[in-house]
Image (cartoon, rainbow, N blue to C red):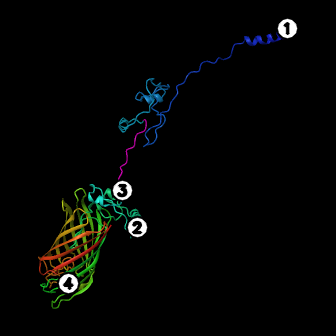
Amino acid sequence: MQRSFAGIVLALALPVCAQEPAARLGTPNQQPTVRASEPDPFLDGPKLPAARLGPIATGRVGEGPDRASAEERYNWGVPRERDRRATPASRTRESDRDRRDDNDSRGATLRNPTSAQLMNNRRNRADLDDPAPGREPAAGPAPSWWPERERDLNELREQFPTFGDQGDRDRLAFRSDTAFDNFSSPISNPFLAEDPRSLTELRPVYMYQSIPGSQYYYQGGSMQFIGTQARVAFTDRFSVAVHKLGWLSINPGSGPGATGGSGFSEFWMSPKFTFWRAPDTQTLASFGLQFQLPMGAGSVYQDTGTFGLVPYLSIGRRLGETSYGTFHLINVAGIHTGTDDNRSDYFFDSLHLDLDSGNQHRFYPTLELNWFRYTADGTQRPAFTFEGRDLANIGASAAGKNYVSIATGFRYRFTDYLQMGIAAEFGIIGSNDLTRFRLGIDLIWRY
């Protein structure tokens, strides 16, 4: 029985053992591995791709472009040299620039940095002492009576974007030109002696003027003006000024038949453009066209003619620094032309010299000289042979007359926003003028 079972098993196994295998497994071919580059150490730009793809020049794996670096060839599958350490490909702005010049599109390049500008919306005393060329001093803190000043003015700047210089884009709307903060505005002849800077300010003005006793018509007496000026700076170069708006009164002396009176003054305003602005040398010049509108009372000579035009040129410059302080010079010249024959025409020149005492930007002694020369007679009041300079255009027969006065005083700056000026003016040429002595006072709130 056992022999029979063993024989059956052998009979079944012999055909299987005699059959050859259908397939044989061989050693697998080792394929090259593509490795990713290490992280890019530069974080100032977009991340580079893990592997850089170049132009396909062959279908064989393990070869790369001839101009590829060792690291790029390694990414293509070329075996690395054994004595070299795997490091990321180095990048510099010079190498990126060379690759751009070679018109090679492989890889990423560094972006050019954008220009940065410092935003100075506040000014302080240190910046005023020695401002950097072309840089505006920073503004001071908001006043207590306007705690929300920065927010309110930022809203205005968004509604009224500035135009002009590149630097204007970083200034607050309607802010005064602060690159010339150490200048001092003229005090006497305030309606015509215009500051060359682009300013935003409110300036109340008071003047008391005594009339010479030798003046043949009034024979003494006085004139008084109280009013205000206002200026708005749209940019560091363009501004609009209201020169004269107020109330004028005349009190005659002992002259027989002389009459006095009071009433509103003429309205004077002008646009002004600063065409020369050099903060590094502290030099600037502006041009304006003043419109004189006779909208006032006839009893004080504020209704003469239709209106007058006064083109003017205003120049300012820092003269030099001494141990006592720094001198500044402002000169304003212009010529009046009436649109009809009723108004008297004249040329004027106002010279202003001030000293920034001790370079403390507080106390400014001033010396000023004003000259008027009448070039054409007016026809509205031809019987009179005297004129009123900046207070009144009488329309008299005054052609060829010269009126010269000298003024001395000071300006004091309480803060960067508030200052006052006072000057005493005396006539030195022109006895028939209406000016024997003038006291002028102003108070400036400036932004």
Q: Residue 147's mark?
A: 2
Given contact means CB atoms under 8 Å apart, are the residues at marks 3 and 2 in contact? no
| 3D distance between C-alphas at marks 4 and 2 | 43 Å
Where's the N terminus, which quadrant? top right
The mark nearer the N terminus, 3 or 2, is 3
Q: Quadrant of residue 238?
A: bottom left
* Above or below 356: residue 298: below
Q: Is residue 28 magenta?
A: no
- The answer to whether residue 19 is visible is yes
Q: Circle 1: is it few (<14), some (14-19), or many (20+) Cα within 10 Å?
A: few
Query: SS at mark 2?
Result: loop
Measured as percent of width and height from the top left, residue 73 is found at 45, 28
The mark nearer the N terminus, 4 or 2, is 2
The mark nearer the N terminus, 1 or 2, is 1
Q: In this view, which residue lies farthest toward the bottom?
A: 256
Q: Which residues are magenta?
A: 106-117
Q: Single out the mark in the foreground, 1 or 2.
A: 2
| 3D distance between C-alphas at marks 1 and 3 | 110 Å
Q: Single out the mark in the foreground, 1 or 3.
A: 3
Where's the C terminus, which quadrant? bottom left
Give the residue pinned by disc 3.
Answer: 119
| 3D distance between C-alphas at marks 3 and 2 | 20 Å
Name the amino acid type tagged 1. Arg
Measured as percent of width and height from the top left, residue 310 is found at 22, 71
Name the amino acid type tagged 3. Met
